[in-house]
Image (cartoon, grey):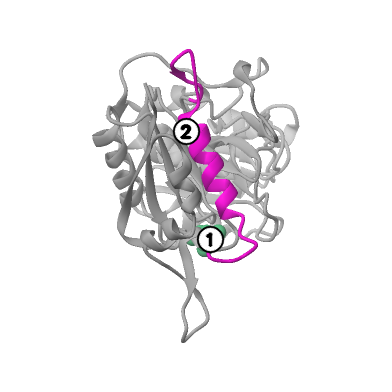
Amino acid sequence: MKSSILLIYTGGTIGMMEDPTTGSLVPFDFEHLQDNVPELRRFNFQIDSVSFDEPIDSSDITIASWQRIAQIIEVNYEHYEGFVILHGTDTMAYSSSALSFMLENLGKPVIFTGSQLPIGRLRTDGKENLITAVEIASAKQNDVSIIQEVCIYFQSQLFRGNRTHKYSTENFDAFECANMDALAEVGIHIEYKPEILFRSSGKFRVKSEMDNNVAVLKIYPGMSQQVVSGILGVKGLRAVVLETYGSGNAFTNSWFLAMLENAIKNDLLVLNITQCDKGFVDQGLYETSTSLQKIGVIGGADMTSEAAITKLMFLLGQPLATSEVKQMLHQSLRGELTSYPTL
Ligand code: ASP
């Protein structure tokens, strides 16, 4: 059977044009984008498209935008072999992480892509990104989709969406995936790495409820008590992503530990991830993380900040008991963390 692919256009630089009065890049409509990539017509399968009513710069992405994307995929799931989402690069790693959690038991490719230069520019990186993303979304082996997860394709590399981070505003290879290999390297051939591709079993379903009562507390030397208490005291807050140093270390001031302990006793979930790009949180390795472990801070292994925030939003949006949420934070739900034997 021939593939058919659905392109979902949300906005981002790939489809932007310069506003003639201000000179700033603003989102443009999808027809403009298609006109600039006539090569799409040369695929020998059908490519349909759907666009957000108002394409946006991805800095304006919200939970409602993720729910909209999830809904489009849900409604069209049986009709298409794969989905390509055109999205701005700024929050692409958040969106691909969020969608990875919302789409349970995904059996088809969902590939995010975009570009650093608008598609109308001569040196655009958007054409190659879009064309290869479509090719990956349609790739099958023995009639089965090779990719069955949410990914980001950018500049010759296919990354797991919930492992990826935008690291460059300048380079065409804007993304990195520091804690695992690329799922595929693209050169003359597309070399997939079957041993690390994510697989799930069970019926596909969309769980798009999220709870945004989540905050990030990034520690830094000289941080004041007022700042910590301000964040921990936010009304209705249910979880905090604690961004620590190195392998999960934080300052050991008694006021800091007491504030955290008190918040945890009052049912706040505190998830410890590292500020480093590569490596993982190993609470107890240094004395400066042992106390965090003791007061009930949860080790977030090697999750990216984007994955940690959206995983918490996702889990808190589900009808789960706190003990279940805690347990799932340790587990890999969609390949978002490595379960090291030491953890
Ligand atoms: N500000 C743009 C966006 O994220 C940047 C891009 O697309 O690369 O929508």
Q: Which residue is mark 2?
A: 137
Residue 133: give x, y in percent of width and height: 52, 40
- Asked whether 137 falls inside the magenta stretch, the response is yes
- Asked whether 27 falls inside the magenta stretch, the response is no
Q: In terms of sequence position, does the residue under pointer 1 or pointer 2 come before the other?
A: 1
Q: Give the residue drawn at x 44%, y 26%.
A: 326
Callout 2 secondary element: helix
Q: Quadrant of residue 168?
A: bottom right
Residue 339: give x, y in percent of width and height: 60, 20
Q: Residues within 10 Å of mark 2 (few under 14, many from 20)?
A: many
Q: Which residues are magenta?
A: 120-147
Q: Is residue 156 above or below residue 138?
A: below
Q: Which mark is residue 119?
A: 1
Asked if residue 1 lies left or right of residue 121, the reply is: left
Q: Give the residue drawn at x 47%, y 83%.
A: 20
Q: CA distance from mark 1 to mark 2?
A: 20 Å
Q: Is residue 265 above or below residue 170?
A: above
Q: Amino acid at mark 2?
A: Ala
Q: Which part of the image, by quadrant, shows the N terminus?
A: top left
Q: Which part of the image, by quadrant, shows the C terminus?
A: top right
